[in-house]
Amino acid sequence: MGTHVIEAGFPVNSDAEFEAVADIAASADNSTTCGLARVVDKDIEAALDSGVDMVHTFVSTSDVQLADSMHASREEAVERAVRSVERVRDAGVEVMFSPMDATRTDEEFLIEVVEAVSEAGVDWINLPDTCGVATPTRFARMVRMVREHTDARIDVHAHDDFGLASANAMAGFEAGAAQAQVSVNGIGERAGNAAYEEVVMAAESIYGVDTGIDTTRITELARIVEKASDIPIPANKPVVGQNAFSHESGIHAAGVIENADTFEPGVMTPEMVGATREFVLGKHTGTHSVRKRLTDIGYEPTDAEVREVTRRVKDYGAEKERVNDSTLEAFAREVGVTHEDEREEVRA
């Protein structure tokens, strides 16, 4: 796909996860591989031993997490963060540091931590919206603030508790972040993370940025992850959902048939993400969609026949669900629409 960095896992978590991270690190020739580690010596050593190109180490910095999750003081958190960053740097490996729960962290303390790890030589500072409470405006302000206190590159990590993860990731880019952490189909803790497909396509299509990612395989990738994770993709999921390029409304479908730009973004076509456009038949369908679909499956309807089939589609759609091809064919036969095969027989 051309993804720049793959955070392959948490090597210290188990032998199986260590082996998985090591396998990915050994085979991902065109991507930087990264291993996750707490600010704990055994975590750092496991990540380094796995052979990754980058170690991402983190510590809670919000007071609530320090007190009731880390059971550590602010001073201890800073000390552990600096020691972990230095250990990775001494090993000659790229290092990223996260002040976990940054968006609920006291700003003065956040800057203190950022400056401390920057002096220790950190390469990347990741700003995580761990509980998904940021808004794009606030998140962008935080990114700009942190940039004023470090020479490290900024990475952002957004959660989707309020449906703002992808927007926050893009706000991070606008404010100067060089990288965003994402997951395919947005899967992750609770409501998930910023979605790979949404962030990539927003960057490519709305912002006009060449990400270097092969967007034509995004839908294929989404289906692979859907199957492997056993987490279904919602039909209305942006970019990769079944309905992402589906049109039922008569007004929408008629416009798209004439010119796809009328009711699609225009800057993002189905072909760009390896998907196909679909005209859905139901209670909102108009004659344009019915005529197109009948023609696609080999019928040669008159205007009157199209109107009559459309009426039946609308009535059926109001009581049932979508009209599939077999149902449409049944309507066509009832109305007496000629099929191209029958036309050939008559000509013969």
Image (tube, rainbow, N blue to C red):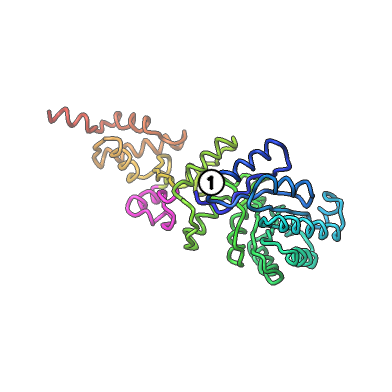
Q: Residue at x 49, y 48 (%)?
A: 1
Locate residue 41, reporting x and y percent.
Answer: 79, 49
Label 1: state its secondary structure: loop
The image quadrant that residue 324 belongs to is top left
Left/right placement of residue 272 relative to residue 300 reads right
Q: Is residue 83 magenta?
A: no
Query: Which residue is the extreme one toward the bottom?
Result: 148
Provide the residue designation for mark 1: 237
From the viewer's perspective, is residue 222 above or below residue 121?
Answer: above
Locate residue 284, reporting x and y percent.
Answer: 42, 44
Q: Is residue 263 magenta?
A: yes
Neighbor class of circle 1 (other Cα within 10 Å; few <14, some 14-19, many 20+) is some
Q: Amino acid at mark 1?
A: Lys
Left/right placement of residue 254 relative to residue 47 reads left
Q: Residue at x 45, y 37 (%)?
A: 318
Range of magenta residues: 250-273
Q: Main secondary structure of the magenta part?
A: helix
Locate residue 301, reporting x and y percent.
Answer: 25, 38
**Along the line of sight, the residue nearer the viewer: 9 or 180:** 9
Location of the C terminus (image quadrant)? top left
Left/right placement of residue 192 relative to residue 39 reads left
Query: Which residue is the extreme one toward the front?
Result: 91
Q: Residue at x 51, y 39 (%)?
A: 223
Q: How many marks?
A: 1
From the viewer's perspective, is residue 243 above or below residue 348?
Answer: below
Locate residue 247, reporting x and y percent.
Answer: 42, 46
